[in-house]
Image (spheres, rainbow, N blue to C red):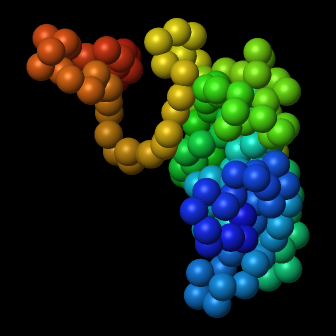
Amino acid sequence: MSETDGPQGWRPVKGTAGCLISVPNGEVITRGLVMPHSPRVDQDRVWLLDSGRGRLVQVDPRNGQMNVVAELPGYTRGLALYGSFAFVGLSKIRETSTFGGVPIGERREQLKCGVTVIHRATGQTVAFLEFQQGIDEIFDVQILPGVRFPAVSGPFPQLDGGKTIWTVPNTGS
């Protein structure tokens, strides 16, 4: 979140001081991110979420050059790469105190919650699953290669009667 090692040290500078740091040598690769999240390395590039701006970005780790791939309608948190696609979790934001002074807070009423699929080469949205009620935050996104008909269950299925709350319909194939 920032170049600090103090407890909660990122909070006072959250709107300006996000950075990407190389773990092996401690060097800062790029600065100026807002609440960065979910870095992933693929094809000699670092893909990450500039969450406080609602962006998917790509960084060249050799020179720190950052490219905005897509602007998205939510607080971006959770990134999975699969082939030519990026799956990005989008959240609405909770309270204004954490997000005060953060650019995405200015769009609070327009934010959506769900998972969007971005074509990495073009930055175009190719699919979007929106949760219109009941769920306001996504914390992570994972790809399950080869899994057909996945299902999501509530956190306490034994209390919910063990019923699935969401599933991909069987298309007969």
Judge from the rendering whether residue 45 lies leftward or rightward of residue 53; answer left or right: left
Q: Is residue 161 above or below residue 42?
A: above
Residue displayed at 12% across by 19% down: 158
- Above or below, 158 against 38 in this view is above
Residue sitting at x 76%, y 15% = 109
The answer to whether residue 135 is left or right of residue 18 is: left
Q: Position of residue 29 (x, y in %)?
A: 77, 76
Front in this rendered view, residue 131 or 32: 32
Query: Could you tell me residue 79's position as x and y percent?
Result: 57, 48
Q: Note whether residue 15 is visible.
A: yes
In the figure, residue 172 lies in which quadrant? top left
Residue 120 visible in the picture = no
Residue closest to the eye, 93 or 46: 93
Q: Residue at x 87, y 70 (%)?
A: 65
The residue lying at 75 percent from left, 43 percent from top is 52
Question: In the visual, does 35 lie left or right of 148?
Answer: right
Q: Position of residue 58 (x, y in %)?
A: 76, 60
Whether 111 is drawn above or below 41: the answer is above
Quadrant housing the C terminus: top left
Q: Position of residue 129 (x, y in %)?
A: 57, 22
91 or 10: nearer the viewer? 10
To which quarter of the image does residue 171 belong?
Answer: top left
